[in-house]
Amino acid sequence: MSIETSFLAMRLEGPMQSWGLDSQYNRRRTGLMPTKSAIAGICAAACGISRGSSEEAPFLEAFQVTKMTVIAIPRKQFKERFLPVRRLEDYHTVQNTRRASGAINSDCVLTHRQYLTDAAFGVIIEGASEYLAEVAEALHDPVWGTYLGRKSCIPSAPVYAGLCETKSAALQLLIGDAPLTAFARQEDVEDFSKGKDSLPDLPVSFASENRQFSPRRVCIHQIGDADSVTYDR
């Protein structure tokens, strides 16, 4: 373990969340796990970095080399009753969208939008200590508001959970003494032999007219699966 590496723990809890991995046009779906691009957006907003600004490029370049682990943490309504996570869909009407020709469409367009209800996730970002220390300070006292995917999705608990020197310490903040194998989770991997899915989920630019993403290799573990990333515990 290098002292130049830290582990940023984040807690994502709220009545509604929405993580649009492939949301486009009038169908805005949600994935079952937070996307890395959304987490980068949360951190950038906390730091007060505008879309497409000169500060955005070096921020995202540093974020791209981090490793992210997402843990699905069941929520309890009563002592022994877990809240089921469901997808909720509603719709919005949007005006002044663009037609295929590029012209402005003044008619109202119906858009369908999905949300996860009663979900909770723990997120661990592994990366350079100096960089994560700045992000941690911003999450503790954010410049702009923090939302769980959309502005209508307000966190019900502080997003910042802690900045740790080891992954085991970060896990302790999120899941206590429970074994990691007791939770479904998704983690970044370094090569194709370890990952099962490539997602277009590594942000290069959030500029409104020029959003760009590069592929990200991940491994998804179901409850009971071994963790492919070793860590001290």
Image (cartoon, rainbow, N blue to C red):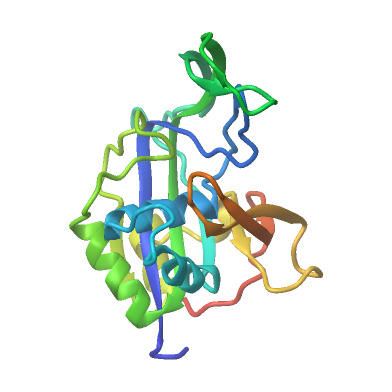
In the image, residue 46 above or below residue 100: below
Q: Residue furthest top?
A: 107
Identify whether 48 is placed above or below 102. below
Q: Residue 31, how many percent across, how many down?
A: 60, 38
Q: Pick the residue in front: 10 or 205.
A: 205
Please name the residue shown 81% across and 70% down the image: 193
Where, by quadrant of the figure, is residue 16 drawn?
top left
Q: Is residue 112 above or below residue 12?
A: above
State the image coordinates of residue 90 (x, y, percent, origin top left). Answer: 50, 14
Where residue 216 appears, x then y in whole percent?
66, 61
Is residue 176 at all visible to an observer of this figure?
Answer: no
Residue ranking furthest to the right: 193
Q: How many marks?
A: 0
Which quarter of the figure has residue 4? bottom left
Q: Nearer the viewer, residue 98 or 31?
A: 98
Of 153 and 196, nearer the camera is: 153
- Residue 34 in sight: yes
Left or right: residue 110 versus residue 225 is left
Closest to the observer, 137 or 213: 213
> In the rendered view, does 104 fall on the left or right side of 156?
right
Compared to residue 62, the image places residue 45 above or below, namely: above
Residue at 42% x, 68% y is 59
Query: Which residue is found at the position 36% from the left and 81% from the top?
Result: 129
Q: Residue 228: horizontal and vertical position, in percent?
A: 67, 69
